[in-house]
Amino acid sequence: MMSPLKPDLLLVRFGEMMLKGKNRSRFEKKVVSQLRGVLAPFSQVKLVTEYGRVYIRLSDAPAEDVGKAVSKVFGIETYSPVYTAPSDSEAIQAVAVALMKKVVKRPQTFKVEVKRVDKSFPFDTLEMNRIVGGAVLRACPELSVDVRSPETTLRVELREKGALLFVETFEGAGGYPLGTNGKAVLLLSGGIDSPVAGWQAMRRGLELEAVHFHSFPYTSERAKEKVIELARKLSAYSGGSIKLHLVSFTEVQTSIYAAYKDNLLVTILRRAMYRIAETIAEREKALALVTGESLGQVASQTLPSLNAIGRAVSLPVLQPLIATDKKEIIRMAEQIDTYTLSIQPYEDCCTLFLPPSPSTNPNLRVIEAIERGLPQLDEWILRAAQEAETVVVTPEDQAEEDAYF
Ligand code: ATP
Ligand code: MG
């Protein structure tokens, strides 16, 4: 029996936005270097830039695993497994038939679209369309031709070195290449929203460092581990590593609580968090904070609350999820594989010492007066930022993840 047909290449396509203007070559270089990073575990694959396109030569590497790695690189719109054939009509027909048999699983309509780049090829485009289409129809009687709106299109490119055939196109991560829009600091909690916000920010070309606040020993070591695991998921999209700053919020929190425990407490604590994150951002030369807030979701996310909290810092606060429904956020969390981690129960530093009814309409002047009554606040904030523990988190070992047990 013939061994099953395997693709020889993956054809990688960039986003349309990227192809225009003066950024093109910078963006392209960035994507190629990101690709090299995610492909490092597949020692046999090779990146080939040819005819102005980027191909991954698979050399027997499993196409699905390589595709999974490719889908972690921002700036890639789609990719297709490509099957090659010698520049010979018979050989092309054989690959076309095997390919259609492999990917088409039910009766449906198709068409063949031939592109003849090699002008010396003995048959012209129309003839080759007919020859290849005829061969497929003879071999797969359950298929029929529909040239106007086919369910499947078999593309055949006739090039000097040989023919390229492909049918399937998969979605890439899209967006802009990592880091092409600068660096920001993500406030990463153990919840559902902030990992998704981080992913969206990275997808817009931001390089991220993450900051997490814990209240050890009030919060457990496990809660911290969970955040490290979330950062690990993000690191796969982040060029293979992400810096995570673990900040002890305990002193700030208990000191504020000792002086004030009324309904503006949440707002005051959040302002302190933002200021600590801003101090770290400035030290790391990041130009914005990124958070997972969504307008109206909870008391601290009403517009008056966001206003009172946002004014604690002067760096812009980016909130990619501000107008996103929870359902949609959950869908994205599932897509980037953070959801099951996020819904594991854990203690959050913010749920400690909560006032019975946090204000939904905090008054900035009152808040500022309370903060003026805490002359050591600046000191606590600076110390928390300075004493942050920084870890570099990398994606989990693929072999371990895929292990059978
Ligand atoms: P999430 O699901 O991201 O925790 P949330 O809906 O629970 O969001 P809040 O708890 O009000 O919202 O937090 C709003 C944002 O503040 C979070 O999205 C996150 O960016 C940041 N944040 C909250 N708690 C922490 C924490 N312990 N460490 C770092 N950032 C935090
Ligand atoms: Mg939360």
Image (cartoon, rainbow, N blue to C red):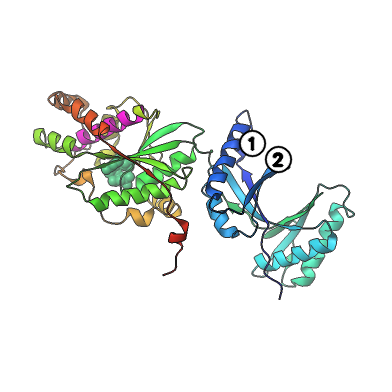
Please tell me how many numbered marks the rendered image carries: 2
Horizontal side of residue 66 vs 287, given as left or right: right
**Is residue 221 depicted above or below 187 in this figure?**
below
**Residue 195 visible at all:** yes
Horizontal side of residue 91 vs 152, given as left or right: right
Task: Indicate which disc residue 325 carries.
Answer: none
The magenta segment is: 266-282
Could you classify mark 1 by the number of other residues whose Cα lies within 10 Å: few (under 14), some (14-19), or many (20 or more)? few
What's the distance in space between the residues labelled 1 and 2, CA to CA? 11 Å
Residue that badge 2 annotates? 52
In the image, farthest residue toward the bottom? 1
| Residue drawn at point x = 46 percent, y = 43 percent | 238
Tag 1's secondary structure? helix
In reply to whether residue 313 is colored magenta, the answer given is no
Q: Amino acid at mark 1?
A: Leu
Main SS of the magenta part reads: helix
Q: Nearer the viewer, residue 239 or 200?
A: 239
Q: Nearer the viewer, residue 39 or 112?
A: 39
Q: Amino acid at mark 2?
A: Gly
| Residue drawn at point x = 30 percent, y = 51 percent | 225
Task: Indicate which disc residue 19 carries.
Answer: 1
Horizontal side of residue 374 vs 225, given as left or right: left
Could you classify mark 2 by the number of other residues whose Cα lies within 10 Å: few (under 14), some (14-19), or many (20 or more)? few
In what quadrant of the picture does the N terminus appear? bottom right
The x and y percentages for residue 227 are: 32, 48
Q: Quadrant of residue 379?
A: top left
| Residue drawn at point x = 16 percent, y = 36 percent | 251
Q: Nearer the viewer, residue 363 or 132?
A: 132
The x and y percentages for residue 32 are: 59, 41
